[in-house]
Image (cartoon, rainbow, N blue to C red):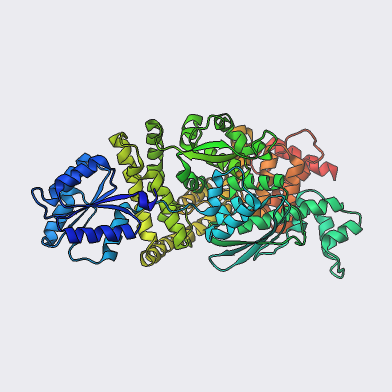
Amino acid sequence: MLKNEIKILIVDDDAVFGATLREALVRDGFHAVHVTKPDDALAQLKLHAFSLAVIDCMLPKTNGRELAIKIEEESSGNTARILMSGIFKDKNFIRESIANTRAKSFLTKPFELPELFQQVNEAIGHLIDIPVSPVLELMTKSIVTPGERIGAINKSETINGFELPWVFSLLMHQKISGLLNIVTADGDPASVGFKAGEIVQVTNKDQKSYFGVLLVEHGFISQEELDDAMELTASAKKLGERLVDSNILSPHAISIVMAEQQGIRLGRIVSNTSVKVTFVENHELREEASIDTNMLNDIFNDWSSSKFSADWIKTFYTPWSRNKVVKGPDFSESNRTMSSPSVLRASKLLGLIAKGITLEAMQIESGLSDTEFYPAIHNLMLGGCIRFGEEMKNTDVQVQRKRLKKLESDLGRQNHFERLGVSSKAKDIEIKRAYHDLAKTVHPDRLGSDAPIDVRDLARKCFNMIQEAHEILSNQTTRDNYLLELEQGRAEKILEAEQMMEQARTCLTKGDIRRAKEMLDSAVTHVPMTTELRLLVMWAQLKTAGVEKDARTIMTLKDQLSAIPPEDRHNATYFYIKGLVLKATSDFDGAKRAFDQALAIEANFVDAKRDLNVLQLQAGNAGNKPVDLLRGDLKDVLGALLGGRKKR
């Protein structure tokens, strides 16, 4: 609601004082009405829907406390109340009055206007619509001009770094060329260059080159060829040019790998922190590599399963729960997004889009879990396949009940930052906007007047948790104390988890899988799932006896491997786990390449050497499944070893 649409009723038999309050509230932007008699107040209540009543306790015929109770009954609890008095100032009286009338607060006369405004804001501030972030507002528009896109970005002040993919998608336009400048809350700069519908350059704090690693990973060259080329330090030419000159590499391979390297750098820019964004038009950008729309959509899909948690995506879309989901400007079966794994897993959604139902109704009707539903929705939005239509004021009670029950459960296990979907370095405007976006979705006053009591109670519980988060985070002192509390507990848990992971790794190397699993299970309960922890857990699973025969588990492990963020996929442990997964799927050539890559990064990786030896011993035994030398049948192990010796 706009501020001037919110009606406030002032009940005070002091005509001068009441008129003064009315004038002050009107100047502050509210629609205010002043009456001097309780009967007139009740008559006004029948004519208009008041969001708040400010009531003096000393009134003729009916005292203010009794009137407050009647107003609650007449408005079905939809009119908040603030009591005031210049006579009754006893603390016990004030406490009893608030308890008996369920008033929001009690003002003792005389009071200053800032105190009144503060109490009014606390009572009904959640009803005041704060404009949606200009960038996010474009999620409701199918046709947006280049000027509107650039204007919205430059008006958005600060945004969450996880919202950058949406900004990237807006700038992928044939008529937009220029540089998106990004500064994190820590002051780290980055930039992304756009030119006629493509990303042509990416710069960030970490300009590490992945060029050689990616060449080997894609099979364009061998590790030996890369090592030889790297030794030619006297050459002034770049690595790619040296390889092309030596007829080892095709120029086409360079463009592919350079684009993928840009994608990795792009991924390092997108993180859960506060960022300031500005866009400067420039049609003379230097083209370093090219990421087109299809490749960017593939990157978005990768991030949906590896970078963003389902919790964050869900919180991001919660304010849109009651909006209709409609077809976007790029809705087409040929859109690359439609064939992305996350959308294919949630293919039921595609048939529901044409129905024009709300987001919350879509999830209920689809029967999809949060981890299936929200990544698919996010991909469809980023890919231009969906947009949001009008907000539905009255929605199905059963849908509301299910959504609120799930939301109550989610909020109960989240910290205050997670509840609002903001980073620990969010600016005040981000916190305020996130709170209002969520509050207008879950506040009981936003429900229809015929909403059942249990649904209203659920909404109240959800709102109270969101309000608690806002109260803590909107005050710098309480926010700093809360952060300190979180960090202290987190630091101890992280240290303990790191020790467990190190011990688990040792156990894995020794073949003590049971003990490794115990330690990793304990570590998972102490800290959020990191890339390193996920890889160690997968390692333990893959080394469990009989797992290679369990097709469902292997498929799950393949999905988990794809959930590793792209920028974290270039270390020895990742390639080793990748080799184990490929080996379990009988891709022995791919497994060998992965083990080779692990050893190229970490030459003394004992486990990678061991598994590589197994594959090499069986290299001439085509068609037979490789034997695990540590846990295989004795006859098979001896056969593999003896077979390897004969070939020597």
Instruction: From the top left corner, tell me how far across and down residue 312 is, in percent.
Output: 50, 49
Residue lying furthest bottom in this view?
234
Instruction: From the top left corner, tell me how far across and down residue 159 is, in percent.
Output: 53, 57
Q: With 586 as the anchor, is 153 left or right in this view?
A: left
Taking depth in this image into account, of 599 and 400 the one nearest to the observer is 400
Q: How many marks?
A: 0
The vertical placement of 450 against 129, above or below, is above
Instruction: From the top left corner, tell me how far across and down residue 613 is, in percent.
Output: 74, 47
Is residue 223 at least partly visible in the picture? yes
Q: With 180 as the anchor, is 625 left or right in this view?
A: right
Taking depth in this image into account, of 3 and 282 the one nearest to the observer is 3
Residue at image point 77% right, 62% down: 286
Taking depth in this image into account, of 4 and 565 the one nearest to the observer is 4
The vertical placement of 346 against 34, above or below, is above
Residue at image point 37% right, 32% down: 397
Instruction: From the top left corner, tell me how far across and down residue 332 is, in percent.
Output: 66, 35
Taking depth in this image into account, of 362 and 609 the one nearest to the observer is 362
Is residue 273 at least partly visible in the picture? no
